[in-house]
């Protein structure tokens, strides 16, 4: 009996050690899912953070719609969306959100002989292309915006997102602001019923589709434009100025954002002369009451590190980082994230 008791005690001890080890491993790894818009940046941040700390951040680029669903279902530690949720929706779901970086959604084309930045478009023309009212690159409306640019008399092949997407939300939100017909017939959201064209999954899917489909047009986040060396269009903004996408025009669009009032900020069709018209922030979603407080702490430590150490990486990929005043507001907002006993999650 004595031997049996020793053996059982030994087994319990080994089991306790294994359990502690498994908890430690879990604490060193968190999972997020959602928007493809910031995916190139989150991947680089995760790699750099892992190198610095040994902590694994696993991020799945599945689209904003899926990211919201997964954080709702608590199958991930954090969700990510380029479509901010309203304060009312957040309260109903028991969630909080905070922005990480800002960027732009860019119309991209594959037209033989047309170089990046040579094609000019405005919101009305872009809406008419995706409504199926403008069907050829030789259309008079496009020619009027591009005198002297050699465009083919070829059918336009529109490409959109096939998955639920915050990039689509920003794109359709913009089209709804500049086209009454678009607003009434299609509207805005992470997914809409596209009148024409084909769909690709993720920013990467749209970029790939446009890259191989002659005379196509699509919309992707700026990092994908640069990574794939895509031909993009200049856009006429709300001030009537044709602007190129880039950090400065994204910053100009974000200049009037009132982050001190609410993190629900939609930055499309802003009034500034230098503003890129399809600009938006991307957001992290977390539950206010955490079933896994250790995982939540690791998540917040990662984003705290990203705000402190990740700006150069973000800027290198042409995202616009949040001002220090905003990141301080974000850190203060994390006091809402608590464990089941009501204790705030520590992230320092």
Image (cartoon, grey):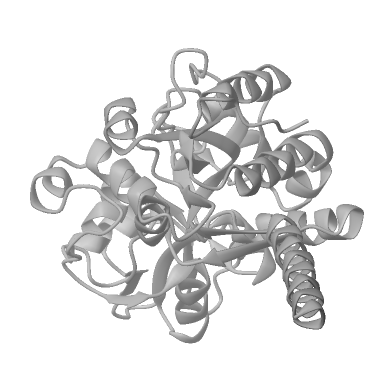
Q: Is residue 225 above or below residue 201?
A: above
Point 23% across, 47% down: residue = 188
Q: In the visual, does 6 lie left or right of 228?
A: right
Q: Quadrant of residue 153?
A: bottom left
Q: How many marks?
A: 0
Question: Residue extending furthest top?
Answer: 261
Point 50% across, 58% down: residue = 76
Q: Quadrant of the N terminus?
A: bottom right
Considering depth in this image, is 286 or 149 the residue closer to the camera?
286
Point 41% across, 28% down: residue = 264
Residue 122: image location, x then y, percent: 36, 46
Q: Is residue 326 above or below residue 219?
A: above
Q: In the visual, does 2 lie left or right of 332?
A: right
Residue 80: image location, x then y, percent: 49, 50
Residue 24: image location, x then y, percent: 76, 58
Q: Is residue 286 visible?
A: yes
Question: Residue extending furthest left?
Answer: 184
Question: Residue extending furthest right?
Answer: 52
Point 75% across, 54% down: residue = 45
Considering depth in this image, is 154 or 1 the residue closer to the camera?
1
Q: Quadrant of the C terminus?
A: top right
Considering depth in this image, is 150 or 129 the residue closer to the camera?
129
Residue 204: image location, x then y, percent: 53, 72
Q: Is residue 150 visible?
A: no
């Amino acid at each position: 009996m004595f031997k049996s008791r020793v053996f059982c005690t030994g087994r319990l001890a080994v089991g306790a050690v294994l359990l502690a080890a498994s908890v430690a491993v879990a604490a060193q790894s968190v999972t997020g899912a959602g928007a493809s818009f910031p995916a190139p940046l989150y991947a680089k941040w995760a790699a750099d953070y892992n190198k610095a700390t040994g902590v694994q951040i696993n991020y799945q680029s599945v689209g904003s719609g899926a990211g919201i669903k997964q954080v709702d279902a608590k199958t991930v530690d954090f969700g990510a969306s380029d479509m901010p949720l309203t304060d009312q929706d957040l309260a109903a779901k028991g969630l909080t959100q905070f922005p990480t970086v800002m960027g732009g959604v860019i119309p991209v084309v594959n037209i033989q002989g047309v170089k990046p930045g040579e094609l000019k478009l405005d919101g009305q023309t872009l809406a008419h292309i995706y409504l199926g009212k403008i069907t050829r690159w030789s259309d008079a409306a496009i020619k009027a915006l591009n005198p002297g640019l050699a465009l083919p008399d070829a059918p336009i092949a529109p490409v959109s997102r096939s998955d639920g997407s915050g990039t689509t939300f920003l794109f359709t939100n913009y089209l709804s602001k500049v086209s009454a017909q678009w607003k009434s017939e299609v509207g805005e959201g992470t997914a809409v019923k596209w009148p024409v064209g084909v769909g690709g999954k993720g920013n990467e899917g749209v970029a790939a589709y446009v890259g191989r489909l002659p005379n196509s047009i699509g919309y992707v986040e700026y990092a994908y434009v640069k990574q794939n060396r895509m031909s993009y269009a200049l856009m006429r903004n709300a001030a009537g100025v044709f602007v190129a996408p880039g950090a400065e025009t994204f910053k100009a669009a974000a200049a009037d954002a009132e982050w001190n009032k609410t993190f629900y900020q939609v930055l499309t069709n802003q009034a500034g002369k230098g503003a890129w018209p399809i600009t938006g922030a991307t957001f992290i979603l977390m539950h206010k009451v955490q079933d896994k407080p250790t995982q939540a702490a690791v998540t917040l430590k990662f984003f705290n590190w990203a705000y402190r150490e990740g700006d150069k990486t973000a800027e290198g990929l042409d995202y616009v980082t949040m001002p220090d005043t905003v990141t301080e507001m974000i850190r203060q907002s994390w006091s809402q994230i608590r464990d089941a006993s009501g204790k705030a999650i520590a992230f320092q």
